[in-house]
Image (cartoon, rainbow, N blue to C red):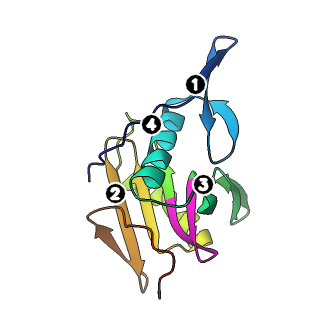
Amino acid sequence: MHIHYPTYQPRIKKEQQKEYIFDEIRKQWVRLTPEEWVRQNFLNYLIVTKKYPPSLIAVEKEIKVGEMRKRFDILVYQADKPWMIIECKEQNVALNDLVIKQMLPYYSTVQTKFMTITNGNETYCFQVIDGKIYTENEIPEYKKSESS
């Protein structure tokens, strides 16, 4: 699916020849990498267009996947439970089976209703129902509570 991103004027600064962008969720300056650019634009889309509450979004938190420690890109909560996990890639990374397989261990640990991958140009969202994965046509609207 193609995302129609809203206008976004991020706060960017340069220090010692490196650019940083202010992450409104983490409330800190982070290194502006190609992946971070995608993550910040997608966060802005979730908050501005889809009305996801910023207070229910976690960014780059560490989780334990088996014996390994990993960091997910974005996790959205609903009713205090993980609801959607989002993996961001830089724009030139193709979203293929390899990227989806990379996300599955995160999902198996966190158990969300939705999984999303994006490179800023392309986005795929999947819903998991009874252990089966279904492709969504769009990013779901955020609802304050859901029965499932």
Give, as a three-letter code, the residue at label 4. Glu
Q: How many marks?
A: 4
* Circle 1 residues within 10 Å: few <14, some 14–19, many ≥20: some
Looking at the image, residue 13 sits to the left or right of residue 37; the answer is right
Membership of 81 in magenta stretch: yes
Residue 10: where, in percent of width, then height?
52, 31
- Amino acid marked by disc 2: Tyr
Does the rendering let one see residue 88? Answer: no
In screen coordinates, is 138 left or right of 82?
A: left
For image coordinates 38% across by 73% down, the residue present is: 127
Q: Secondary structure at mark 1?
A: strand
Q: Quadrant of the rendered structure where residue 36 is?
A: top right
Q: In this figure, which residue is indicated by the disc labeled 3? A: 72
Residue of label 1: 12
Q: Which mark is residue 124?
A: 2
Q: Is residue 28 left or right of residue 148?
A: right
Q: Nearer the viewer, mark 1 or mark 3?
A: 1
Q: Is residue 147 above or below residue 74?
A: below
Q: CA distance from mark 3 to mark 2?
A: 16 Å
Query: Is the residue marked by circle 2 packed among few (<14), some (14-19), or many (20+) residues within 10 Å?
Result: many
Residue at horizontal 63 percent and vertical 59 percent from the top: 55
Looking at the image, tell me whether mark 2 or mark 4 is earlier in sequence order: 4
Q: Could one spot residue 29 in this view of the protein?
A: yes
Residue 35 or residue 95, whichever sits in front:
35
Which residue does the image show at 34% across and 57% down from the upper left?
A: 124
The CA distance from mark 1 to mark 3 is 23 Å
Marks 2/4: CA–CA distance: 14 Å
- Whether the magenta-drawn stretch holds residue 134 is answered as no
User: Which residue is disc 4 drawn over?
Assistant: 90
- Looking at the figure, which quarter contains the N terminus? bottom left
